[in-house]
Amino acid sequence: QSVLTQPPSASGTPGQRVTISCSGSTSNIENNFVYWYQQLPGPAPKLLIYRNNQRPSGVPDRFSGSKSGTSASLAISGLRSEDEADYYCAAWDDSLSGVVFGGGTKLTVL
Amino acid sequence: EVQLVESGGGLVQPGGSLRVSCKASGSSLTSYWMHWVRQAPGKGLVWVSRIYTNENNINYADSVKGRFTVSRDNAKNTVYLQMSSLRAEDTAVYYCAAGKDSGAVFAYWGQGILVTVSS
């Protein structure tokens, strides 16, 4: 059971906009930055969004992050087949003194 | 850009010990938080431990506290995870990851190394 809660799956058709939610608590999401990671089949995860809504260089602006209170979300617009991957949210947890991840959301592009 | 390469994984019996290493190239690790993150087969990401420049700044997940020890050798640009009293549920791909913020930022990842705990 993960500390951060994500839907196990999401789907969309090419060109659509998809949103993935991440729910936590005051000790993690509300009080700390949220990060998002993309894991394609095989390789290591890749940082997609940092500090709630910032994109590292090289990440398309189709990806955006937001946070409100104890929840955060990742939005992917103009969905493409290569976006099919697992997506994870993560945050520092003040109560646990450690990093907590969501359980991951498997995105399928139909 | 930081490149990370893990080594030292393999098969170990329950109750045994194993040390995995993470060597960095391309940049000095001294200003980075270094983390270990694991992923059991077919499962999600789980954070294991982190260490900053000196060994006064170390944290562990409750599931490994007292069994795993993280350390670093800045001169060798290498981070280690010493694992003892290993259990079947420790079987996973172990990734090392680096980030400059103190939070859940993993800007650079290694390719991962498989640790299998089985008799």
Image (spheres, coloured by chain):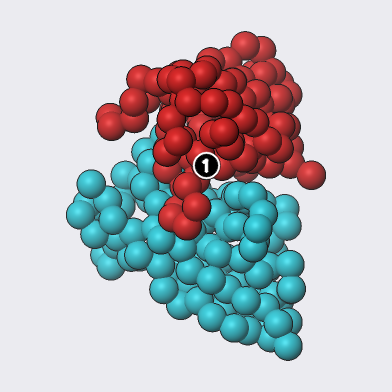
* Of the pair A59 and A107, the residue shown nearer to us: A107
Q: Residue at x 64, y 50 (%)?
A: B44
Category of crowding for the residue at label 1, using alpha-carbon neighbours closer than 10 angstroms: few (below 14), some (14–19), many (at least 20): some
Q: What is the residue that sits farthest to the top in this orientation?
A: A68
Q: Say above or below: A80 vs A68.
A: below
Q: Is residue B60 visible?
A: no
Expressed as whole percent of the image width and height from the top left, the position of residue A25 reads 73, 24
- In this rendering, the answer to whether B74 lies above or below A24 is below
Quadrant in the picture for the C terminus of chain A: top right
Tell me the cyan chain: B
Amino acid type at image mark 1: Ala
User: What's the chain of the residue with tag 1?
Assistant: A
Rendered image quadrant of residue B85: bottom right
In the displayed structure, A16 sits above or below B105; it is above
**Figure colour of chain A:** red
Q: Is residue B32 above or below residue A90?
A: below
Q: Position of residue B52 (x, y in %)?
A: 43, 48
Which residue is at the front of the view, B57 or B42?
B42
Q: Is residue B100 left or right of residue A66?
A: left
Does any portion of residue A99 appear in the rendered image? Answer: yes
Picture residue at 73% right of the left edge, 57% below the top: B63
Residue B17 at x, y percent in the picture = 62, 81
Q: Quadrant of residue A72?
A: top right
Residue to which mark 1 is pinned = A85
Side of B66 where B108 appears, left or right: left
> Considering the numbered disc 1 on the image, is that residue within a helix, a strand or a loop?
strand
Where is residue A69, by image quadrant? top right
Count of numbered circles in the view: 1
Query: Which quadrant does the N terminus of chain A fall into?
Result: top right
Which residue is found at the position 68% from the left and 67% from the top? B90
